[in-house]
């Protein structure tokens, strides 16, 4: 299987990224969405925004959202302020956000976690999601198909225990397994026979952190 770097991978994926159902995104959305409350008037930075799933979600609920991503092609249709930048070196001032969202991005740049804590204000919240590290250790891959070819996206391994940064205190950790909504996606993709095994263990994690008051 061909392995390519994330920026190149998402450049290839950009045009079709929002068209194909994705079981992990389905699970993540129904897990994280209930946590994103009281957004009206808040400044939210969506790091690794891609095509802007979460930036659009919080904007629709009254937040002022800014998206950041390192892939220009993914940002092309962004209907919100967007910044082309590396998550490890965010061109944003300290304590500029009331909340930060980082979805399915840490696996490409675990070192960016400290930046999430830097840009959120005291008392603010950081929400993080990703493929569960244990799932990757069991052999899961970050893959997609392009022109009929299976491609793996290069990533960096980390553990949940590695998610530490000055001033960020863990508030909640959710480790959900695939459920019935995702089973339907597996069936639609013609791989229903793989669902039972995939659903045995947590597929993703969603974590919430609070920036302690300085």
Image: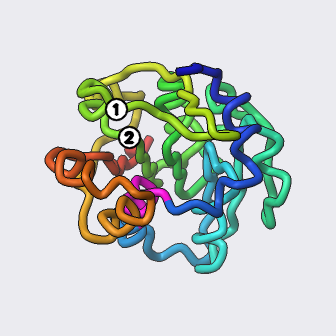
Near-viewer residue (144 or 133): 144
Please state the horizontal and vertical placement of residue 120, each as a whole percent of the image: 55, 46
128 vs 51, left or right, is left
Q: Which residue is mark 2?
A: 131
Q: Earlier in the sequence, mark 2 or mark 1?
A: 2
Near-viewer residue (48 or 35): 48
Crowd around label 1: few <14 · some 14–19 · many ≥20 (10 Å):
some
Label 2, secondary structure: give it.
strand
Q: Nearer the viewer, mark 2 or mark 1?
A: 1
The residue drawn where x is 58% and y is 30% is 151
Real-space Cα separation, disc 2 to disc 1, in angstroms: 9 Å
Q: How is the image coloured?
A: rainbow
Q: Which residue is mark 1?
A: 140
Crowd around label 2: few <14 · some 14–19 · many ≥20 (10 Å):
many
The residue drawn where x is 41% and y is 28% is 165
| Quarter occupied by residue 177 | bottom left
Task: Say above or below: 183 vs 38.
Answer: above
What's the magenta region?
22-29
Is 142 magenta? The answer is no
Please state the horizontal and vertical placement of residue 147, each as a whole percent of the image: 70, 40
- Main SS category, magenta section: helix
The residue drawn where x is 50% and y is 48% is 103
Task: Say above or below: 210 vs 161.
Answer: below
Label 1, secondary structure: give it.
loop
Q: Quadrant of the C terminus?
A: top left
Task: Say above or below: 81 vs 42.
Answer: above
Near-viewer residue (139 or 67): 139
203 vs 11, left or right, is left
62 vs 76, left or right, is left
């Amino acid at each position: 299987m061909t392995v390519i770097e994330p920026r190149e991978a998402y450049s290839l994926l950009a045009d079709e990224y929002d068209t194909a159902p994705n079981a992990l995104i389905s699970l993540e959305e129904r897990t994280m969405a209930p946590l994103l409350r009281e957004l009206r008037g808040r400044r939210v930075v969506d790091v690794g925004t891609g095509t802007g799933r979460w930036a659009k979600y919080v904007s629709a609920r009254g937040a002022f959202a800014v998206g950041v991503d390192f892939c220009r092609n993914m940002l092309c249709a962004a209907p919100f302020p967007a910044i082309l930048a590396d998550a490890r070196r965010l061109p944003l001032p300290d304590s500029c956000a009331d909340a930060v969202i980082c979805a399915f991005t840490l696996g490409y740049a675990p070192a960016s976690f400290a930046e999430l804590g830097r840009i959120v204000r005291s008392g603010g919240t950081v929400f993080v999601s990703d493929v569960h590290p244990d799932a990757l250790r069991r052999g899961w891959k970050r893959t997609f198909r392009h022109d009929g070819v299976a491609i793996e996206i290069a990533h960096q391994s980390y553990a949940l225990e590695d998610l530490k940064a000055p001033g960020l205190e863990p508030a909640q950790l959710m480790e959900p397994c695939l459920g019935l909504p995702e089973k339907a996606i597996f069936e639609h993709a013609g791989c229903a026979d793989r669902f039972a095994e995939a659903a045995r263990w947590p597929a993703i994690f969603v974590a919430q952190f609070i920036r302690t008051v300085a």
